[in-house]
Image (cartoon, rainbow, N blue to C red):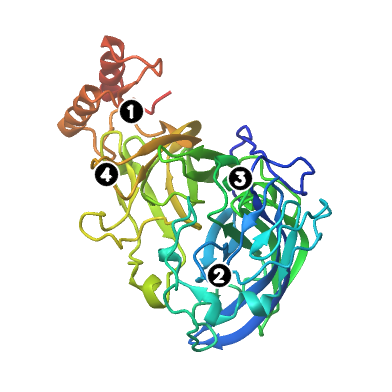
Amino acid sequence: MSRTFPLALVSLTSISTISPIALAGPDLVCSEIGSAASFGSADGLVSYAFATTLCNVGDEPITWNANTNEHPIISQTLYKLSDGQITQIGIGHVRHMSFALESNACGLGCTPAGFNMLGAGCSTTSAGTINGSQGLMGPRIEIESNDGFFPYPFDSINQAGDPVYKRLRATIADVSDQDALYFVETQVVTPGETTTESKANNASYRQVLFSPGTASATLTGPTYSGQPAINAWRDHGLGINQPDTSVIITQATTPNGGIVHLGSKATLTRTIDDIEYYRYDYAVHNLNEDQSIGRVLPAVFNALQLDELSFAAADHHDGLDELIRDEPWRFVGGHGSSGWRSEFDFEFDPLGNAIRWGTMYSFACEGPYKPTTGDTTIVLFEPSDIGEYGDLNIHSVTPGQLQICGGDVNGDGLVDFFDIAYFLDEYNFRDSSADFTQDGLFDFFDISAFLDAFAQDCPLP
C-alpha cells in the first residue's frame, strides 16, 4: 500500500462564492456550471457541454458584441482524479458568446448597461445545448487568452459535423472508471478585462458523474467559482471534500503577465533493502500565458536513477486545433535542467505540443529520492520578440537526497572509475547531487565524503 509524504500545504486564494466587493473595472467569472448536455458518441469518443452562468463582478460594464471580436468566449475541459494523480482527459473548441441577458443571478444588484453590454453586477446564462452548438464554436488556437483578442469571423463559424466535432470530448474508456473522480472546468476569456486580478479568477470547476454504460454526464456538488480544476487534486485528493495535504498547488505569474499553476506531490511506492522509492507527480496548468510552456524542469539530481516516467495530456482536435502536434513530451537529463520538454521546439514547429492556454499536462517519475521542497523551472515555448525564452521558478515538491550506494553515483550498479568521473563532473557544475555533506556548500568536505563512500561502498546516511 502506498502512502504520501506529508508536506506543508501551500494554499491559493480562492473564490467559492461571489464576492460582494467588486474589483475596479470589468471582471467576468463563471459563477455556476449548470446541467450537462450529452451529444452522443463517435469512434469511441463521447462529447458534452455544460450550462454556464457568467457574472460581471466588476464595477464597470463589459462590451458584448456578438458580431465583432469584442465578446467573451468560454472554454470547457474535463479532468480525472485517480490513484493520487490528476490528468486532463478532454478538451474542445471555444464557444463564442452571442448576447448578454443582463439578469441578477449572482445577487449583486444588476446595473443594466444597454445593448451589446453586460452591466456591473449583471449575469447571463447559457444552456448546455447552446454552449455545445457547433456553429458557435471556434478553434482555441485563434484566441489570445491574455488580452482576449481573436479574429472575426472566427474559423469554422456556422460549421457542424458529427456528434463529437469541435465539442468537449473524451474517450469512453477515460470516463468509465468507477473509482475515479471527474471534474469539468469552464474558463471565460474576454477582451474587456485589463488587470491581472480580473483574469486570475477566469476558471471555475465542478464535479461530474458519468453513468456506467451510457457515459451520460450529470453534475453534483457546488461550483468552485474562480478556481481552476487543478485545485481539485488538493481539495478532493482523498475523496470529495477530503483534502490531500501532501499536494502543493502554487500560482505564479510569467514575465509576460500570464498566470500558471503548478501542482506537485510525492508518494512512497515501495521499500527495497531499506531504500524508499517515491513517485513524483507534477501537473502544470496554463491559465492564460499566450507564449505557452515548453519545458518543465523539477530539481532532479542524478536523473539516471529515475524510472516509471510518464506523460498525460488531452488531444487537440478538429479544424485549426487539429494542426497542433500531440506527440508525448520526452524526459531529458542534464546539469540543472533535468525534466520534460516538448518534442518540437518553437523554431522547428510553432505548432509543437506546448502547454497552451486553458490546458494542463501531467508528468510523473519514480526514484530512490527523499522528498523535499524546492523550485521547479517552467520555460516558455515561444521566444519573445528579442529571441529570449521566459522562465520562472515555482515552489513545489522536489526529489531530495538520493538513497543509493554512496559510491555508485552514476546509478549503473557498479562502483568504479566512471563514478569518480561522474562525481567530479557534477561537482564542477555545482550540482546538488555533489553536495555530499548536505550543507549547501561545495568544498573539500564533499570530496572527502564521496571518497569515503566510494571506498566503503556503503549507502548514503
Q: Earlier in the sequence, mark 3 or mark 2?
A: 2
Under circle 1, the secondary element is helix
Viewer-proximal residue among 72 and 348: 72
Q: Which residue is mark 4?
A: 385
Separation of disc 2 and disc 4 at Cα? 30 Å
Q: Is residue 87 left or right of residue 336?
A: right
Mark 2, mark 1: which one is toward the viewer?
2
Residue contact at pointers 3 and 2, CB within 8 angstroms? no
- The reply to whether discs 3 and 1 touch (Cβ–Cβ < 8 Å) is no
Secondary structure at badge 2 equals: strand
Residue 211 location, quadrant: bottom right
- Numbered badge on residue 197: none
Mark 2, residue position: 96
Q: Amino acid at mark 4?
A: Asp
- Distance between the Cα atoms at labels 3 and 2? 20 Å
* Mark in the foreground, 4 or 1: 4
> Which residue matches tag 3?
198
